[in-house]
Image (spheres, helix red, strand yellow):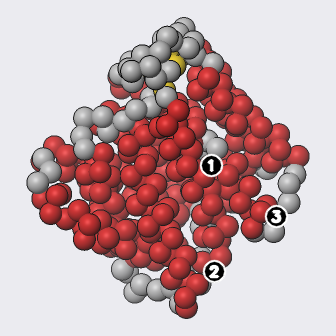
Amino acid sequence: MKTRVDAIPMLALMCVTAIWGSTFFIIKGILTSIPTLDFLGVRFFIAGLVIIVLRGRKLLRASVTTWKRGLMAGVVFAVAQIVQTIGLETADASVSGFITGMYVILTPLLLFIAFRTPISKPVAFALVLAFTGLSILSLNGFSVGRGEGLTFISAVLFAVHIVLLDQWAGQESGLDLAAIQLIALGVICGVSALPGGVVLPSGINGWAVMIYMALIAGIVTVGLQTWAQSRIPATSAAVIMTTEPVFAAIFAILFGGEHLTWRLFAGGSLVVGAMLLAELAPRKSSTADGGVAVWEDSDSVS
């Protein structure tokens, strides 16, 4: 079980979350001309095709176990993306963001239920802070309907994806596992876009956005997340990933013409504080593994 965190994987996962955050105002623009399922289909089809070109021969030599695990993780992530997108058709974006962010709570619960993984007291408190911060950031009135229910299902699936990577990423080739996930994403999202025909981006700007979403926000993020989670406990990864709406707000303010509000400042501060608490509050151990400082959880809630 991974119980330590070092700086480089943590920064890598922060980069992943920052890239995801950068996509919100970009997607908002492109979805005015392309249906959501078509957008997902084209995006991940391109990503999967590039992966096949770059690593096709090496993937043929990957073990059956690696293929099974990569496909399973990819299917879970693809279904989560599709279910979340369908939920957004009837749920407010702010409410959807809050419900989706509940994977930060669901991840340690799933780990505890499935593997009896203990939750350290600092991380447990960080989860409460993150949950509170997400609610301030995203929630402004609440009603439960079909869209909200589907969004909650997607949050469960995102948590399952994090748990699967936590269990498998350290046992398999990170590149192969990430590549197979992207192929699964490309196939499933591509097929989901076929009914009624696929609408493609128009113009240089539309294709530039799609290429960015496929290569940077697709291949790079899945690869970095898979690698980082082979070195970071799943609960810590979930807390780091709660900074996604904070990065989304920063990019929206800098490039999307939005304004800083008290909700953004207060909620964002709690989320960032939760991340710092989860990563820095555990007792610092003596240097190990060649002098690299690591952090270890002490007291646990079990």
Residue 244 disc label: 1
| Circles 2 and 3: CB atoms closer than 8 Å | no
Of the pair 155 and 256, the residue shown nearer to us: 256
* Three-letter amino acid code at the position of disc 2: Thr
Point out residue 288 in the picture as x, y percentages from the top left corner. 42, 16
Point out residue 89 in the picture as x, y percentages from the top left corner. 59, 67
Q: Is residue 60 left or right of residue 54?
A: left
Mark 2 or mark 3: whose residue is earlier in sequence:
2
Mark 1 or mark 2: whose residue is earlier in sequence:
2
Secondary element at image label 3: loop
Location of residue 20 by image quarter: bottom right
Looking at the image, which residue is at 88% across and 46% down? 262
Point out residue 265 in the picture as x, y percentages from the top left corner. 83, 44
Please identify, in this view, whether the residue under mark 1 or under mark 2 is nearer the observer.
Answer: 1
Q: How many marks?
A: 3
Of the pair 271 and 276, the residue shown nearer to us: 276
Q: Residues within 10 Å of mark 3 (few under 14, many from 20)?
A: few
Quadrant of the frame with the N terminus = top left
Q: Residues within 10 Å of mark 1 (few under 14, many from 20)?
A: many
Q: CA distance from mark 1 to mark 2?
A: 23 Å
Of the pair 168 and 280, the residue shown nearer to us: 280
Q: Which residue is mark 3?
A: 258
From where the camera sits, is residue 124 visible?
A: no
Q: Which residue is mark 2?
A: 32
* Three-letter amino acid code at the position of disc 1: Glu
| Circles 1 and 2: CB atoms closer than 8 Å | no
* Three-letter amino acid code at the position of disc 3: Glu
Location of residue 184 by image quarter: bottom left
Q: CA distance from mark 2 to mark 3?
A: 18 Å
Mark 3 or mark 1: whose residue is earlier in sequence:
1
